[in-house]
Amino acid sequence: MKILFLNGPNLNLLGQRQPEVYGTTTLADIESAVRVQAEGRAEIEFRQTNDEGELVTWIQDAASSVDAAVINAAGYTHTSVALRDSIAASDVPVIEIHLSNIHAREEFRHNSLIAPVCEGQICGFGPTSYVLGLEAALSLKMD
């Protein structure tokens, strides 16, 4: 099984940006932990971009190359109809994840435009959200 992890804007700054919200773990640290957890069970690919269009293209291209995707769309979660539409049009099951509990933060973060077109949402567990996203994607294989 091949699982694509997509990371949106500012996630390249993990470990530096608002550590009181996002912690001190870097995206590279998270990727390493996911790879360890996936060993022997899935092939993992990690990508990060600050560009909405690139995320849309990656979702569109995923149909021909992966079995599932796990996405932390960051700020685009709450604003991007284009990202939502690309997930809805894709044949790839997508799991939405967030480091923080978006429902316990500012009001504008409570609404996820992508949640209705994803298989499910995991939020609020810090870096463990990524490992839980991996497990959720792997469970899709069993269905």
Image (tube, rainbow, N blue to C red):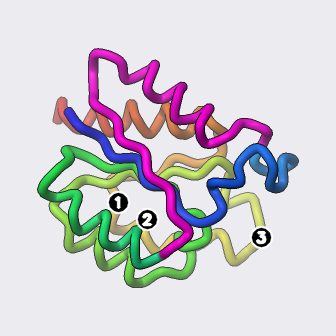
Q: Do the numbered discs 2 and 1 sit on residues whose CB atoms are within 8 Å?
A: yes
Q: Residue at x 21, y 63 (%)?
A: 61
Q: Is residue 91 above or below residue 53?
A: above
Give the Cα distance between marks 2 and 1. 5 Å
Which labelled disc corresponds to residue 118?
Answer: 1
Examine the structure image and report whether residue 27 is included in the region drawn in magenta: yes
Residue 52 location (% of width, % of height): 47, 76
Residue receiving disc 2: 115
Q: Is residue 102 above or below residue 138?
A: below
Sequence-first disc among 2 and 3: 3
Q: Residue at x 71, y 48 (%)?
A: 14
Q: Is residue 18 above or below residue 76?
A: above
Q: Residue at x 31, y 64 (%)?
A: 58
Residue receiving disc 3: 106
Residue 26 location (% of width, % of height): 68, 40
**Which of these two is toward me, 120 or 37?**
37
Secondary structure beneath label 2: helix
Q: Quadrant of the C terminus?
A: top left
**Which of these two is toward me, 31 or 110?**
31
Q: What is the total number of numbered labels drawn onto the structure image?
A: 3
Residue extent of the magenta highlight: 23-51
What residue type is disc 2 on? Ala
Q: Residue furthest top?
A: 40
The local crowd at label 1, few if under 14, some if 14 to 19, many if 20 or more residues have their Cα within 10 Å, is some
Sequence-first disc among 1 and 3: 3
Residue 113 location (% of width, % of height): 47, 75
**Which of these two is toward me, 51 or 70?**
51
Q: Residue furthest right?
A: 20
